[in-house]
Image: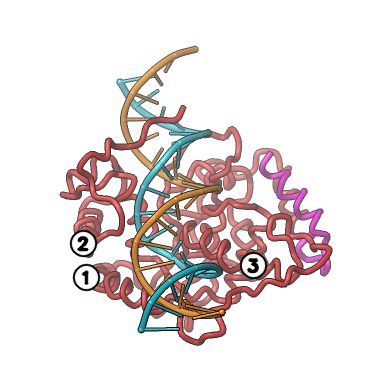
Chain colours: A red, B cyan, C orange
Amino acid sequence: MGRAPCCSKVGLHRGPWTPREDTLLTKYIQAHGEGHWRSLPKKAGLLRCGKSCRLRWMNYLRPDIKRGNITPDEDDLIIRLHSLLGNRWSLIAGRLPGRTDNEIKNYWNTHLSKRLRSQGTDPNTHRKLSEPVLVQETKRKKNTKNSKGNVKKKKQQTVNKSKTDRDQVEQEIFRPKVHLPKPIRVTTSFSKIRRNDSFECNTTSGTSSSQEIREAGFDVPWSNFKEGVGFLVDDDDDGDHEHDHLVSGSDFECQSQVPTQQDGTLEKLYEEYLQLLKTEDHDQVELDSFAESLFV
DNA sequence: AATGTATTCAACCGCAGTCAA
DNA sequence: ATTGACTGCGGTTGAATACAT
């Protein structure tokens, strides 16, 4: 297993993407779709390795990406999911429409873990620390100016420029915008749930793992496993959530490709999980052990 | 104003799972 | 069963910037 880096990197561009590269990549994917990352750069006229292209697309150029302004609700959800799933960022991202694993990982490392610590919670175990660690979440936060405001402006300008073209093309396609999970590979393996598992519900594709989980019985209900959480639908497609509303996973055509129950055991597990959540002051240990039981 | 330190986050790296030959 | 290619993931890095002194 494992392999050498995906390309020799000889003569390939690295570092920040230019608007021109973004445009090339976006247009190519609009025309030909995602996938075949290894051969994509050559075909798209990019001097990048496939990995870099994929990352750029997944984390930045996809039309359904939301950037910044993580809401308190999202905060809360990230923390809850992290307490259950640990550093399975892609899995967590799968529950936050429009958010990428990279963004959530960064956000966790730079904001949430500090905040939890300052509140006396161990960000790794989500258990109370003996004494709260007095850590300022961020010194710069008190400044109303965006901490990286200037940077962001600069970068945002770049991004927006390239995004404008995309938006014109995509708007028609993605309105009303339903933040479906990112496209992922489908496999037929039923074997086990791995680190990159995702609960996302996808009408056209799914990771092996999300599929596995659906196959394992979490088809629709799991998508709502946090009370009040479902898919965010951005009615006005304005990037914020002023008019967004939550849609129950059952409102979508979330299809398992195989019967969702194998023996009903997992359905019981799910019920058990719901009960744990409903309990006002459920024991974190119970939740932990429950989550662990899903991944063994 | 200059310098040092802290913070943020896009991008990279290496590993691992899956598939197909 | 083996092997190489492809893809996706989490951890890490480093440039850019903000903040503090």
Q: Given this view, does label 2 or label 3 mark the residue nearer the observer?
A: 3
Dot 3 falls on which chain? A
Relative to residue A187, is residue A226 drawn left or right? right
Dot 1 falls on which chain? A
Judged from the image, the secondary structure of the residue bearing numbered disc 3 is helix
Which SS type dominates the magenta stretch? helix
Q: Position of residue A186 (x, y in %)?
A: 44, 41
Q: Are marks 2 and 3 on the same chain?
A: yes
The residue type indicated by label 3 comes to Lys
Answer above or below: position of A121 versus A88.
below
- Would residue A188 be visible to someone looking at this image? no
User: On residue A114, which mark appears?
Assistant: 3
Answer above or below: position of A57 versus A137.
above
Q: Tell me what residue is drawn at x 70 percent, y 39 percent.
A: A263
Q: Given this view, does label 1 or label 2 mark the residue nearer the observer?
A: 2
Q: Could you tell me if the residues under marks 3 and 1 are in contact, i.e. CB atoms within 8 Å?
A: no
Dot 2 falls on which chain? A
Q: Quadrant of residue A115?
A: bottom right
The residue type indicated by label 2 comes to Thr
Q: Tell me what residue is drawn at x 32 percent, y 71 percent.
A: A155
For label 1, the residue is: A165
Q: Quadrant of the C terminus of chain A?
A: top right
- Cα–Cα span, label 2 and label 3: 37 Å
Q: Tell me what residue is drawn at x 30 percent, y 59 percent.
A: A16
Relative to residue A287, is residue A255 drawn left or right? left
User: On residue A23, which mark appears?
Assistant: 2
The residue type indicated by label 1 comes to Asp
